[in-house]
Amino acid sequence: MQEVTATSRHYVDRLFDPDPQKVLQGVIDMKNAVIGNNKQKANLIVLGAVPRLLYLLQQGSSSSELRAECAVVLGSLAMGTENNIKSLVDCHIIPALLQGLLCPDLIFIEACLRCLRTVFISPVTPVQLLYTDPTVIPHLMSLLSRSQRTQEYITQIFSHCCKTPEHQTVLFNHGAIQNIAPLLISPSYKVRMQALKCFSVLAYENTQVSMTLVNVLVDEELLSQVFVRMMQRDQPIDMQLTAAKCLTYMCRAGAIRTDDSCIVLKTLPCLVRMCSKERLLEERVEGAETLAYLMEPDVELQRIASVTDHLVAMLADYFKYPSSVSAITDIKRLDHDLKHAHELRQAAFKLYASLGSNDEDIRKKPILESGVIELLCSLTQSDSPALRVNGIWALMNMAFQADQKVKGEIVRALGTEQLFRLLSDPDSNVLMKTLGLLRNLLSTRPHIDQVMSSHGKQIMQAVTLILEGEHSIEVKEQTLCILANIADGNTAKELIMTNDDILQKIKYYMAHSNVKLQLAATFCISNLIWNEEDGSQERQDKLRELGFVDILHKLTQASDPNLCDRSDTATHTSDLSPAVLQFLSSIDRQTRTNTCTLIVL
């Protein structure tokens, strides 16, 4: 170690030689010494090489060659560990390199940009540093025309530093679209690829950018058609996938119709191809997640995807990868995939949820044919809270407006013991999604009565414990909604009427200060007292004896803003009073049961 440090100190000492030629040779020798040697890089940083290199880089008296070599060495140091990057950023390397871009020498500019690219693609670099000086972005735009290297580096910097809508707006306002669009037909693949990635981050959830892109011409060809060509099977996978992302984001932003041929016949099939087992793990993850995002709001795209290239069967493989008998012979790749296999599962969750979000026939086909229910149920037993959440979340979505066969399969595969174990899970997200699943299982009267006849005692115990416990408003509201569904059953409602403890809890929440809890509790009573049902008079008499009528009368005058969250006073007060009047009159029946609104992963 002392020997290595002594050698490293020698390199640093040479940077202070009074002879400029010896300094230049010292920098060149340092460049050769650090290539592929992280230990040497760390030693040089500790010994103070970075401030001296930055000083030489910024001195007008330094030769162009010396300044460029300093930028190259700094770029090499940046290719080391994340700690190296932090040290460079702490030494204010970014402002120094950005200042260097004002120099007319192209070789020096390219060296500065290459180093900036390396620094900015690191996850530990604050991307906001690119936007601190308002003159930087327009200057970078002006440098795009200097060379293919400046085009490659600058577009890569943009794509990595565009993280927020504000960043998108800054780039858009400084002419990103018109400056970068011509690069899509550059003779350099690297330039085309980085320009494409730049458009994908600019268009993501951005209507303004997407609406502009759809009208852009590149060499007299619509930009969307350029993207379509880039998705052809003979193009590199990375290009196909990124072009598909661009069109997906433009479609979701409303710039392209979901029934447009470039979406139905090109983008969707391309993304399905990315899900095949022949693709690398990263490609399969990105393909599945992008496909899920594309078709999430559109039932027709969901139908098409469900019958395209055995997609459902492909997704089942996501849970089995990598198998014990893997085709991967590269040990490093196998080790990487084993560490990141959970990303495949999470991507599959998102795609399953999106596929089955609107159409019952499709849902029966992701669910019953693929055997995914058993896989999802097994994940709810994982030690990882994230996997438990995703597993139960997907089951909740599958139970949404499902028929009894699907619901029965979920209950059978999950098992009542595991269901009630999840209802006491210490992770609040797991608890919320489990309540959502239970709420979706308890929808429509036959389903409610069937579930409660088998598991009513345990469900009522779980409900009691949650309402008594220290839980959030959202958890208790969800639990009260479950009670409201139970109250709509033909026979299930008796489990509430014969449980004075539960009735007192409903009464308590009807007088609660939170309007969401008031409304949910009041729905329970609405479903219990409806006139046209057998036994309604007896139930009304009992509730009257317990003081519910007095509370209902008070709620008809609920206009005191103290009863509502201050921010939602007007909305919630107007919702509450008509609902109470409805209960008192027992005439017009509105919502009797409710399901947990479908939420896609």
Image (tube, grey):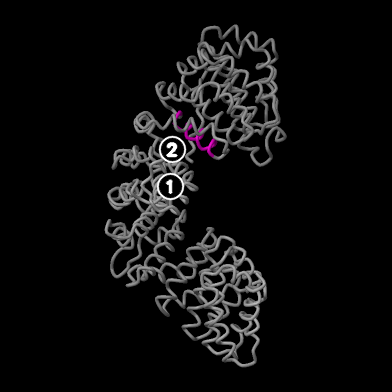
Tell me if I can see residue 185 in this picture: yes
Q: Nearest the camera: 200 or 92?
A: 92
How far across and how far down the image is residue 138, in percent?
51, 74
The dominant secondary structure in magenta is helix
**Labels in figure, total:** 2
Name the element at disc 2.
helix
Q: Which type of secondary structure does the marked residue at label 1 adopt? A: helix
Q: Is residue 513 above or below residue 251?
A: above
Q: Kindly indicate the quadrant of the structure image that contains residue 230.
A: bottom left
Residue 390 belongs to the span the image colors magenta:
yes
Image disc number at residue 445: none
Q: Label 1 neighbourhood size at 10 Å, few (<14), some (14-19), many (20+)? A: many
Name the residue carrying label 1. Answer: 289
Q: Which of the 4 image quarters holds residue 304?
A: top left
In the image, the segment drawn in magenta is 387-399
In the picture, the disc for residue 353 is 2
- Residue 509 picture location, percent across and down: 68, 25
What amino acid is labelled 1 in the image?
Glu
